[in-house]
Image (spheres, coloured by chain):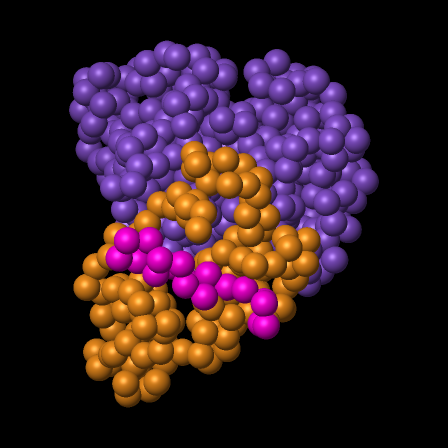
Chain colours: A orange, B purple
Amino acid sequence: MSEKPFRILPKVTPGNEHFWKGGAEGELRFLRCQDCKYYIHPPSPICPECLSKNLAAEAVSGRAQVLTYTINHQPWIPGVPLPYAIAIVEIVEQKGLRLTTNIVDCPIDEIEIGMPVCVRFEQYDDVYLPLFAPEGA
Amino acid sequence: MTEILERRAAITGIGQSEIGRRLERDPLELTLDSCLAAIEDAGLTRADIDGISTYPGNLTAAPGFSGAGVVEVQDALRLNLNWYTGGPELPGQLGSVVNAFLAVACGLATHVLCFRSVFEASAQQRGVVPQGRATSDFRASGFTAWTLPFGAASAANWIAMFAQRHFHEYGTTREQLAQIALNARKNAGLNPKAIYRDPMTLDDYFAARMITTPFCLYDCDVPVDGGTAIIVSRLDAARDLRRKPLRVEAVGTAIHGRPSWDQFDDLTTMALRDAGPMLWTRTDLRPSDVDLVELYDGFSFIAMVWLEALGFCGKGESGPFVEGGKRIALDGEVPLNTNGGQLSAGRLHGYGFLHEACVQLWHEGGERQVPGNPEVAIAAAGGGPLGSCIMLTRT
């Protein structure tokens, strides 16, 4: 197996570990308000919809659509193979529930806005990065 | 109607340091050069300065991003201050100038020294990702925790995704985007202080290497070293100074969506969407009254969003609006970025636009002077979740 490309990893905290470590169980998890059922991302101590503090991490399906993307050609970070696709995807469970990620396992010239994608995880140390690939890829 | 308090403020002087690529000069010295030039330009002495306002303060987060903060400048010039502020959590770089308007309007200060300095050209020779980050034991936190792991390391990537969505929803093209860069270069050719002055064609634009789609090299501004300073005075203390004071007509500082680069509700626009319209709620002037605009072009696309946000064209219509470049040329209906903007004159990070608006309203633009004795200008700075705009008049 080839060595995975270098990535700068996120600092894992009690507030975000459900997100960064959910991949260990194959789950994409978001904080969710247990009162009004609103998903909250990035995590916050209070529901921005109903102001409840009754929050818990819950898994979503991992299905999403590409809202927008860019193919990056610039070597911002030494040791990262170029080019690569950065995207903002919206999780199907809730309008506006989105994250920045990479589109993988897809030729870069086939990436389209609106394309359905599905999560897959790449492990680095204690972190499971949620990356997205075309459905069925 | 509540009083438009910013109208009690005026701009009375401007100054710039030497500006260049990789000057390798002490960034505090560059900052002070600009400050002293502005104080002299206003016909003041340092004893008259009783306020300081700056963006982003003495931050070391990104290489070369800040040449100096309040403390260094105050101490170097031994200023006695009645009011000061400096920091990054403002509606864009010009938010620091808006703060100064309010400070003089409220009587907290009489003459405020506003400044912004950078030394990114020198600092970035040693890498864009700050030293120590590109090692296995560095961990990203704050907003960058959500972007750096995916290689979305630069605002170029974040803004490119807004542009891509704009292309998708409105059919905007790279040919249209190119007009922002070509217009800037054309104007820079008439500005002796601009960094890139050689003529550029559409073919040159398309031949440039891609940075992050749809942005090529010429859609991205050019890092420089240099400082810009602006003197904000209380209007009733400005009348007997060296220059005819430029009056502040209105400002826009709003952000109504989420304060984020990737969570903002509308991915075809940015916080500018809210700052632009707010300005028009504070003045009876209309876009047709404006003689020139200096709009942030850290990336070409941001200037297009500002054109839409300020109502010079409809939402989504900036592509056709700039097509061919005639409307935004020096002799067009909305002259844009008359000194070459950050794309060609250099990334002075927001303050360069306000400086140039003043140059034009004082009719000191030389070869690049907008014809017809312009009297009303808008300077706007910021992109993503940061943005504010200022309307000045010479009447």
In which quadrant of the rendered view does residue B114 lie?
A: top left
The reply to whether the magenta stretch includes residue A130 is yes
Residue at left offset 47%, top offset 58%: A101
Q: Is residue B367 left or right of residue A43?
A: right
Query: Can see residue B232?
Result: no
- Residue drawn at point x = 43 percent, y = 34 percent: A78
- Which residue is at the front of the view, B390 or B206? B206
| Residue occupying image coordinates x 31% and y 62% | A20
Along the line of sight, the residue nearer the viewer: B32 or A88: A88
Name, please, the residue furthest toward the bottom.
A35
Residue B373 drawn at (x, y percent): 68, 28
What residue do we see at 55% from left, 69% from top?
A117
B334 horizontally vs B9: left or right: right
- Is B156 rendered above or below residue B193? below
Task: State the image coordinates of residue B360 (x, y, percent, origin top left).
Answer: 60, 27
Q: Nearer the viewer, residue A77 or B95?
A: A77
Please state which of residues B178 and B161 is positioned toward the viewer in this rendering.
Answer: B161
Question: Can you say whether B274 is above or below B366 in the image?
Answer: below
x and y percent of residue B123 in the render?
39, 23
- Label total for image: 0
